[in-house]
Amino acid sequence: MSSIMKGMIAMLFALVVMPQCLLAQEAVAQHEMRKQFLQLQSTIHEQNQLIKSLLTRVDVLETQMNGRMSTISLSRPDAAGPAMEGLSQGFNPEIGVVATVQAHITENTEDGEGNDTIALKELEINFAQYVDPYSRLDAIITLNDDLEENLVEIEEAYYTHWGLPLGFVARAGKIRPKIGKQNVLHLHQLDTVDYPLVIQDFFGEEGLAASGVRLQNFIPNPWDIPLQITGEVLRGNNGNSFSQISRRPIFNSHLSSFFELSDDIELELGTTAMFGEENVSGGSQGDNRFGVHVFGFDATLNWYLPEGKKAKLQGELYFQDRTDLVKTNFNPWGFYLLADYRFHPKWSAGVRVDYLETLDTANEHTFAVSPYLTFWQSEFANFRLQLQHLNPADGQPDNGIFLQGNFAIGEHRHPVQ
Amino acid sequence: MNMLSKIVFSLCVALTSGFITSPEVSADVIKIVATTSTFASLAKEVTGDLAEVDYVASPKRNVHTYSPTPKDVFKVKIADVFIHGGADLELWKSPLLEAAGNPAFLGEKNTVIHLSEGIQMLEAPQELTRSEGDIHRYGNPHYWLSPANVHIIVNHLAMRLGQLYPQHVDVFKRNASQFQSRLKKKEVIWQSELSPYVQQAIVTYHRTWSYFSNYFNFIVVAEIEPKPGIAPSAKHLIYLYEIMKSKDVKVIVKAPFYERRTPKKVADVTGATVVTLPLDVGGVKEATDFIALIDYNVSQLKRAFSKGVV
């Protein structure tokens, strides 16, 4: 056999036999791959089962964590309830300071306090914090450099407790009673530099603040109108109209309702009824117990205009029916009307008109008109210029100019009234 | 009537008047009150017909300076769940809850849900001082203006409400999921519509639009307010004229409750366009829900960028 023949036989053998061998090897490889594939499939299935069980476990842990988070979240001051941060500073009360500086120039020639002078009218320091999950304590202390009054005074200091039976909210301590709209406000919250004259005459230059207890709730009604009722029992040793005797209390009640006349117009109406006793020398009231009756009506209309502008109209009317044991006037009465317009982020202007038949002047009246302009430097600082023309029932007419600045630092907030 | 009788009588009258005002949890419908209309709208998306959802602050007013009314107090008093933004968005929240005195929301209660949990807050101040204006201690609280954050909010709502009402957990999850599907589809459209204006510089009135701008990739170069809550001064306006010209700012964004005179003045000098965008659902009549709110804002911005029309 020639070498050519041998080569051809070898090639033929290779062509016939080699593919068979390769096919056999491929079958083995395929079998191996299939085996590996099945193993992989099994592994994936196991992993899926593991992931599922882990996800279930995560769900359970998340649920447990969220239960805790609702507690932990309260440690943030932005959350509702006590700020229990667990660190000593977390228990410190909120502290704020508001300074009111006031200058007053008047035609009045008397050398009275506040005439032709500039003074720190009031420095208000407030402390507040939750007592526990059910209650809160607020204390507002005021200091002034007035020469005729106390330098330090408790403006308000009260304990508030919610969650009482039937949904009541109670407040006890020294409070500004719920008499209309302006008496509950602090000096720096007013639209004007002073309280309306009827409030000054009936309850004191800075309104009535007295120790006592308050209960507040809403009265249900079929129209879903918020009817809020407030009942207060106050110590009697405060106020111009009352006894100045601690054990002869003042009873006060206020009923208010609120209406949304449109998306932009709100109306709030309220009535006040107070009962107390006169300040009779010797303390004998005879048959005239609770001889001082004060009745009042208040109305506030807020109109929210585009671009942050706002117009407010407010009025309060009070009259008294009292026994004739002390005061000259048995039926003093008075009212104020206030119009305020915030027409610019930095500016607002308004006017207050006062009319009053005072406790001490029957059948004659006091009249005042007080236009003002306020510059709002920021939410925490403002300056106010107020003119006042006063025509008192028992004196000479007077014209005055007030300039007032209010400045706030720290944590300072006001209750919703 | 002697004094003691009067005291007893007064207390009886007061207690009787409140006899049926005790907050009661309805077995059927969940009563939810949210601080803002947007949070209320998102809660409604999650709860569907299972809840009556109301809100406190009008979307037409500045939520920071809102004063709660007696009606708001009444709403909170009778609600089962209270939802708020947290992060000092609503500084009036605690006085509101205290005035309402609803024990469900005071103390350690799960019925108060604050939505900033899980949100990556922007612009947290390095130092807490009012010399920096009306800043917020936890950072910028306008986080809901980013659709990405709204996914987190909705998930959070579904989870927290599911814990409170486990019998409805599946419905809450399904509703949340359906809302998110719709939101995702819209997100693609919004991104596409505003894609030509990516990296555009804008000026805003207040530091309100940081999350929105981050999401849509705009650059806020300045605010009309020199510092948060501080009204603009003449000196600041000069600064604005310079920076807007140097950064080629074409659009000034303001919310409806901010005055228009100053932005208009700046726009007149710099050639920019003022566009008024609502922050919350109901801020304009077209913004009937969250998706409609962003729809409206995207369309207004697109118009302002493309045509210079307000």
Image (tube, coloured by chain):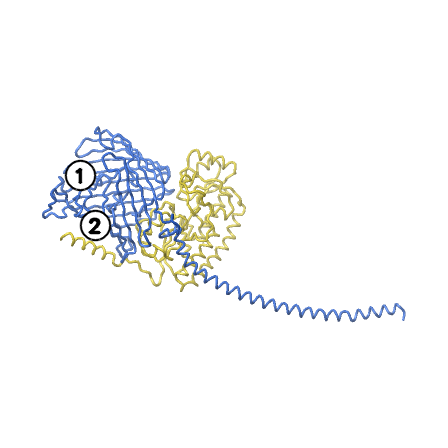
Chain colours: A blue, B yellow
Secondary structure beneath dot 2 equals: strand
**Residue picked out by circle 2:** A233
Q: Whole-percent x and y of residue B305?
A: 50, 43
Q: Secondary structure at mark 1?
A: loop
Quadrant of the image for the N terminus of chain A?
Answer: bottom right
Report the number of numbered marks.
2
Specify the amino acid type for callout 2. Val
Residue A385 occupies which quadrant of the picture? top left
Residue at horizontal 34 percent and vertical 42 percent from the top: A96
Q: In 3D space, how far apart are the residues under numbered discs 2 and 1 (Cα atoms)? A: 25 Å
Q: Which residue is mark 1?
A: A358
Residue located 43% across and 62% down the image: B171
- In this rendering, the answer to whether A118 lies above or below B107 is above
Chain for mark 2? Answer: A
Which residue is most to the front?
A88
Judge depth for marks 2 and 1 and give the one in front: 2
Q: B97 or A191, which lies in front?
A: B97
Three-letter amino acid code of the residue under disc 1? Thr
Residue A321, percent from left and from top: 15, 45
Host chain of mark 1: A
